[in-house]
Image (cartoon, rainbow, N blue to C red):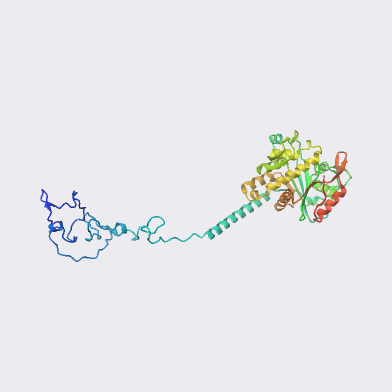
Amino acid sequence: MSDWDGWSGEQDQRGRRDDGYGRGSGQAEPEGARRMRHVQRPGPGPQASRQPQQPQQPQQPPRRPAQPPAGPAYVPPQQDGSYSGGSFDSGYNTGQVYGGGSGRPPAGPRGQGPGGPGGPARPAGPAPDWRKRIKIGSIVLVGGLLVTGIGTYFWADSNVRREVDLSKVIERPKEGDCTTYLIVGSDSREGMSAEDKKKLHTGSAEGKRTDSMMILAKCSSGNTMISLPRDSDVEIPSFVGSESGKKFAGQGRRVKLNAAYAEDGPELLVRTVEFNTGLRIDHYAEIGFAGFANIVDALGGVELNIEKGFKDEKSGADFKEGTQTLNGEQSLAYVRTRYAFAESDLQRTKNQQKFLSALASQAATPTTIMNPFTLYPVLGAGLDTLIVDKDMGLWDMGSMFFAMKGISGGDGVSMNMPISGQRGGNLVWDKAKVQQLVQQIQKDEKVTVRGN
C-alpha cells in the first residue's frame, strides 16, 4: 500500500480523493502538513473520522540531518504531530531548521536585552583604555615636535651667514656680566631686483652702509636697548684691516659713526663702538633691506601704534595716526624716515627701537616658533640677508629676539645714547652719562641713566 492509501475523502472525477487539504481548498481551515503514516493527529475530529486508525508507532527522537534532503516530500523533524488548532513551531525563530543558526535568542530593541524588555542584557565588550590612548598620542606628538625642531635647527644653522670675524678686532675692553649685541640694519640691496628697489624706495647705490645701529645688553637685572645715531661724532681708532690684515694707526680722525662701517666693514665698526664706549661687544648681527621687509611679510605684518601721522617722499612713508598693521614695504619706510622730523636722526632711532621691539614681540611667540608653516617662511626670509659673527649660534639669536621682546613688554629700558651737543653737524655723546651707563651694564646693575 502506498503512502496515499487509506484516505476517506471524496473522489474527484478521475477517481482521486480530495478532502480539501493541500490543493488550494477554499475551506476556512488552513493548509497543514501532508498526512503521512508517521504523522498522527490528536483526537478524532471531523476529518480524522474519514480515515482508518493506524497503529500507534513509537516515536523516535528527532534527528537533525546534516543537510536538508532533496525532494518536496521532506518534512522537518519539528513537525512531529504537535500541530494543534492552527499554528505550529517551524523552528525558524530558534535557528533550529536544517541545523542552522547559533541557537541564541534574537536581540530585542536597542537598550533592551535579547527578546525585548526583561530579557538578559547583551554582554558588553571591553571599555576603551583612554589613558593608554592619550599616552600614545602624547608620545607621538612630542616625537613629531622633536623631529621637526631638530630638523629646523640643523636646516637654519646650515643657512646662517657667519661672515664677521671678531677675532680681528684689537685692543678690546674687558668682558662684562651681561651679553651684548651690536645690531645693524644696512642699506644693502643684495638680492633685490630693479622692481624691488623701486617698490621699497631704496635707490640703486652700490655697496652698503649702516642705516641703523643699536646695542642690546641682555642682563639678569633687566635688558637695555641703546640706539646709536648714525650721525654720532666718534673717533676712528687704530685697527687691523679685515681684508688686508694690515694694521692702521689711529690718527685722531673724528667722523660720523656710519663712516667706520663704510671704511672697513663690520669689524672696524665694532672696534670703533668699543673704543668710544668702553663696552665690549659679544655678538654682531646685521640684516639688509630685503631681508627686513621679507621677514615682516612672512609674519603677516606687524601691528604698530603710530602716535602721529607723517609723510616722507624719499622713504615712501605715508602714515595716518592710530594702530595699524604694516607690511614689509611700509615697515621699511617707517624705520628709514628721517626728513619728516625736526630731530631727524634721534626720532628715527626711536622709531627703529619701537618697531624692532614690536617685531620681536610678534615673532618670538609659540604660534610662530611651534608652527613650521610660519617658522620656516620667517627663517627663510631672514637667513638670506642676515649676517652674524662666527661665534653666534641659533641659541644666541633666539636670546637676542627674546631680549628685545622683553623690552617691549616693559622688562627693560629703551633709549638713545645720551647726547650733550653737536660738532659740525655731528651729535656729541655725553661722556659722563655714557661712562655711567657702561659701568652699570658691565656690572649687571639696573640701568638708571636715560638718554635723549
Q: Name, please, the residue furthest toward the right.
A: 252
Q: Quadrant of residue 306?
A: top right
Rendering coords of residue 442 (x, y %): 81, 54
**Closer to us: 219 or 388:** 219
* Residue at x-position 15% and y-position 53%: 19
Q: Give left or right: position of 4 versus 337.
A: left
Quadrant placement of the C terminus: top right
Q: Name, please, the residue furthest toward the front.
A: 118
Quadrant placement of the N terminus: bottom left
**Closer to us: 338 or 376:** 338
Q: Can residue 189 be spotted in the picture?
A: no
**Closer to us: 207 or 152:** 152
**Closer to us: 293 or 350:** 350
Q: Name, please, the residue furthest toward the bottom.
A: 58
Label tally: 0
Q: Name, please, the residue furthest toward the top.
A: 313
Residue 57 versus residue 160 in the image, above or below: below
Q: Can residue 354 be spotted in the picture?
A: yes
Rendering coords of residue 212 (x, y %): 77, 43
Rendering coords of residue 427 (x, y %): 85, 42
Q: Quadrant of residue 134?
A: bottom right
* Residue at x-position 78% and y-position 46%: 214
Rendering coords of residue 292 (x, y %): 71, 42
Q: Give left or right: position of 228 versus 59.
A: right
